Amino acid sequence: MSFNTFGKLFRFTTWGESHGPAIGCIVDGCPPNINIKEDDIQKELNKRKPGQSKFTTQRKEDDKINILSGIFEGKTTGTPISMIIYNKDMRSRDYETIKNKFRPGHADFTYLKKYGIRDYRGGGRQSARETASRVAAGAIAKKVLQNKIGKKYKVIGAVTQLGILGCDLKNWNDNFIFKNPLFCPDKSILKLWEKYLLSIRKAGTSCGAIVEVRARGVPLGLGAPIYSKLDMDLASAMMSINAVKGVNIGSGMNSAMLTGEQNSDEIFKKGKNIKFKTNNAGGILGGISTGQEIIASFAVKPTSSIIKSRKTIDKFGKNTSISVKGRHDPCVGIRAVPIGEAMMHCVLLDHYLMNKAQCVN
Amino acid sequence: MSFNTFGKLFRFTTWGESHGPAIGCIVDGCPPNINIKEDDIQKELNKRKPGQSKFTTQRKEDDKINILSGIFEGKTTGTPISMIIYNKDMRSRDYETIKNKFRPGHADFTYLKKYGIRDYRGGGRQSARETASRVAAGAIAKKVLQNKIGKKYKVIGAVTQLGILGCDLKNWNDNFIFKNPLFCPDKSILKLWEKYLLSIRKAGTSCGAIVEVRARGVPLGLGAPIYSKLDMDLASAMMSINAVKGVNIGSGMNSAMLTGEQNSDEIFKKGKNIKFKTNNAGGILGGISTGQEIIASFAVKPTSSIIKSRKTIDKFGKNTSISVKGRHDPCVGIRAVPIGEAMMHCVLLDHYLMNKAQCVN
Amino acid sequence: MSFNTFGKLFRFTTWGESHGPAIGCIVDGCPPNINIKEDDIQKELNKRKPGQSKFTTQRKEDDKINILSGIFEGKTTGTPISMIIYNKDMRSRDYETIKNKFRPGHADFTYLKKYGIRDYRGGGRQSARETASRVAAGAIAKKVLQNKIGKKYKVIGAVTQLGILGCDLKNWNDNFIFKNPLFCPDKSILKLWEKYLLSIRKAGTSCGAIVEVRARGVPLGLGAPIYSKLDMDLASAMMSINAVKGVNIGSGMNSAMLTGEQNSDEIFKKGKNIKFKTNNAGGILGGISTGQEIIASFAVKPTSSIIKSRKTIDKFGKNTSISVKGRHDPCVGIRAVPIGEAMMHCVLLDHYLMNKAQCVN
Amino acid sequence: MSFNTFGKLFRFTTWGESHGPAIGCIVDGCPPNINIKEDDIQKELNKRKPGQSKFTTQRKEDDKINILSGIFEGKTTGTPISMIIYNKDMRSRDYETIKNKFRPGHADFTYLKKYGIRDYRGGGRQSARETASRVAAGAIAKKVLQNKIGKKYKVIGAVTQLGILGCDLKNWNDNFIFKNPLFCPDKSILKLWEKYLLSIRKAGTSCGAIVEVRARGVPLGLGAPIYSKLDMDLASAMMSINAVKGVNIGSGMNSAMLTGEQNSDEIFKKGKNIKFKTNNAGGILGGISTGQEIIASFAVKPTSSIIKSRKTIDKFGKNTSISVKGRHDPCVGIRAVPIGEAMMHCVLLDHYLMNKAQCVN
């Protein structure tokens, strides 16, 4: 039971509303004696910072992280790490118009109906601003795993489909991804994507995206039978990200269309190493990591706040319509890339610790 | 932390290996004073029973449920409900050939490497036989929700894609589904599916499937912000089912290809009722049920145990190949339908109880 | 949230009513590759078996344990261990008289008022019979800790106060405890205790007791700050035993009467070893084990079912009185000794695994 | 698994070190639409504030609470409530002398040995300063329960034994308790207690205490069988408070010395009300509240930091001695009163919500 906590042994709890005084995150269960400085976290946060290109919202959010506990003389002590980001660019007036209307595709309707009260300013708790906290937690998980596993451990995400446009996964280039504003892994398609996204924005609408996150250097044996499966926890992690509607592991939904011999990744030994010919499994068999690359992807629905007018009702139950004029991303999927990476780090560390706890070797 | 327990307030714990003396399930957190008899559970179990048609494995499993506790004079008492199914048709010799070889696509490799020991007989703990326990738990959740919500509450699942063949969702017919051996909801496509599946079997291979589960009559307000989202728990639930590789809520992965105005379900009032024009959201906004139909679908990969020979290694690390001749389903997705329904019931009841606990009204 | 589950990483779930077909226990989180046979568990169960002397109830309960899963070729596999004890000596007629009356000091009143239904036969779920399941779980925890820590690991409990009679702790003799029917550690007091207990029984009443449980060879470092303190979990564990009303760690309630210099255990180094002059702390400082002996004690209230007539009401709210004539222990504290030992094993293993998970070294 | 989180449905997570920039608390699971203002919390915090009399430490801690989230227009919204207290009076130099020596009775030794690192400044995480966070969480729980149950709900604690001096519980006077600096409930004994405590302080030592907490107006039915017993969670809650070594429910450890007819509280009906003649049970039977007053008491060991010299070792393993000269309470038990009250509120609200979740009526 943890409405605002994620994880089992490596746990983080987030708090804060979009337009309250601050948002924050408590990381619990972090091993001691890990070097962590604010800059390690800030670097990751900067990846999801808005206002970095014409393709993302023009809100300026500093997202300056402050560590309030759990680090002593540059090292974790095993006690909870509290991090806080003070909210700055809060133009509450922007949201007065939507105070009384339910934006279709948003949680306005369900939050108010469920709780009978909601902080509507900037989406309040339902704002994607909460994901900054996850990125902060993920930055810590990353440092721990790098310390425990070593340099071969790497998580990298990218947008692999932008609206109706895919990309060629064979062209995936780690180094290119964070050098382009769309977090596109395939240089050959970038121009087309940019053109497409500008047309989407110009049309006053938005588009969805697919984000793929890959983890390398993950040891064999993470995950556990039945209800602590690694894929189960990844599905839960990715689906918890705002606007995500679908999650795949490896070949995912496409596996439905494969035959048994197409799908089952053949195993062979080469020298001293056990290898797999393919990776439809996404690096997970029976809920347990195989030592291959872990591959999770997820669909992010199009931004629901659009200029195009949509029919809706107001909180008094009257039919009306709404056009949302704020500063919104034409594709929220892009900024979901660092969030997906963060969730991957957190799930992997959680299972790394669980594996220790199971005393399997 | 619950390796073999699912759920938060309505929790079930499963135990047992495929070829051990029995398998079973403990349901904890079931409200008192609900009428439950063994037959309510047996009826659901019979849906996933093997050996019912030429399209499923010919193993005979009685799957006869026995209730050992928690029911007094026909009613739940609030104490844990222990259920047991004794294993009958256990031909352990069938599995001697695979004792030392890792079947590609199976958990043989990861289980042994992780734990250093595994009960290989019939797949041991990794066998899909464990899902009988889930169906039993789901049958109880169903009874509770019918008692609390009333007759309008209904969960129904079907196979909506069989390998490369889809179906027309407009032809979805609740009453047809459990009258055909493929749990196909669309009468017009059934013959084609049957032909296709026989050809798959004849070719010594298998195919994947997509299962869709719909829940009606679910009250608005189930689910909670951020890390107890209803969709997050559904993703986790469905991904925990053996062989599942992808999960969608509503338009799911397809939402990536929609624009903002295509995707956001417009809201309107008709008479006294609040309605949505479409249901891309799958009945969930911001992690909370809207009162619409809840729609979750998932991909089941093709059965990994196939006659066609596959390259693999043995447990001593030598290259070899394997052809699995046992009595296997050509498409395990079919028997996943009642399991998907069961997981839906369990997740919904869990959130129903959480909603009570949040004292929202 | 776990109504019927105890523990975090090493977890056990119990089920079953006193007069249902069986009771049982699922152990989850047990490390793999530990040798366990039914006899290891049976031996512990036999310690709490009723009908072993004139000082305990004359009910005959075989308490024959059966392992149904989780052990393969004599070793744990990391999957849940399901154990079952079939109920035999169930004379339901004995309980007809108390069907409608609330026995003072029992849970009859609260269970029925809370749930609106209860299995009154033999106390149903509230029966101390449930503790057999704990002893079974404890036997497994013991085996694991002996395997991990080695022979120096030992847990031993005894009755240190019987009603108004104490004993001399300086005479504590491990070897004497299970050779006398009162689990008394002090040979010099036994005769007096026996005389006293027979007089209690003869008077148609009962008496309370204090049980002390000691754990030796526990490594330094088990437990964690603030809300996973070892002493906190021990308090919870011991208080969960039927009829327990108070729990002490080390000098416990008496520490209130000490001064700072009396209470704080001085530390010194002798050769290579760090030693403490005294052990008022009961082996725990700041929630973490010091490497000293862990000492927990708890008070068991007198058996509530007594022949002496007590005023009460019936379930229709009428004033009446009750005299309980069944086969009851004059002091339930005695049979609580193996239960206290079992809970100690379980809590220690849980924290042993948590310590691994914290990656502290 | 929650190293720094307490509770199941009403959960609070604390963070922060004594001499870090701040300490704080996140409350999760608080029902919506409850009026809460900072002053409600401040009032409770002021009770445990140091420097209020000559009997407590002369450190000045403002303990000024700030609410950062979860309250909108004066009301809870159902989202996490983040509270922060900035640390002010941090004279780190005071602690330089104890940087390298383990104070007997403190967690210095176990923390450093376990984690290999510790923030020694002012005790770091092990400082009782953490309990301010609990008091803040308790203030919220109190407001919720007052809102749900009404005015009859009241929790009140007091010191009932100060070192070797008890008090007469028959003289318990709610109104007197917070009007005297020793939180003594018995006016007739206060002068003696004051004299005694001054002598303790003058002797450069400290004394222990017993704190009793009573809860009135608690509805029948809170708590649940076996491993969510109300008394079990109270034991855990109270034992988690710094320096607590023993916990009693009702007659507690004394129940060992009673006979069956002395102990079992007789039940009778008077008019329409069900009454109990006595309350040895402390308001709990079978883990479930009876509707009587809930009574929990706990022993707080004497302050370990004393001027009297104690033998110890330093962190290099050398024998030495220590005399702690800081500004310490001669009896930390006094300031434990509001903490005990806070933990009582939190446990009761947790079980109140669980009771809702169990759908028992």
Image: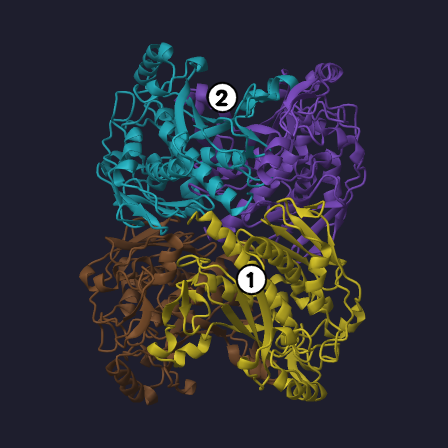
Chain colours: A purple, B cyan, C brown, D yellow
> Identity of the amino acid at label 2?
Asn
Q: Residue at x 56, y 31 (%)?
A: A296
Secondary structure state at the residue bearing disc 1 = loop
- Looking at the rendered structure, the secondary structure element under dot 2 is helix
Image x and y of residue D198, in percent: 70, 86
x, y (%) of residue C336? 35, 71
Near-viewer residue (D320 or D352): D352
Relative depth, front residue between C322 and D126: C322
Mark in front: 2 vs 1: 1
Q: Return the chain for callout 1.
A: D
The image quarter containing residue A150 is top right
Image-based side of C104 in relation to C56, left or right: right
Q: Position of residue C114 (x, y in %)?
A: 40, 55
Where is mark 1, residue-wise? D152
Q: Which mark is residue A31?
A: none
Give the amino acid at mark 1: Lys
Q: Is residue D15 above or below residue B59?
A: below
Residue that numbered label 2 is attached to: A254
Q: Residues within 10 Å of mark 1 (few under 14, many from 20)?
A: few
The quarter holding residue A259 reads top left
**What residue is rendered at 30% in x and 29% in y?**
B47
Left or right, residue A72 beside residue C136: right
The answer to whether one can see residue B1 in this image is no
Picture coordinates of residue D181, whole percent (x, y): 69, 77
Write down the chain letter for disc 2: A
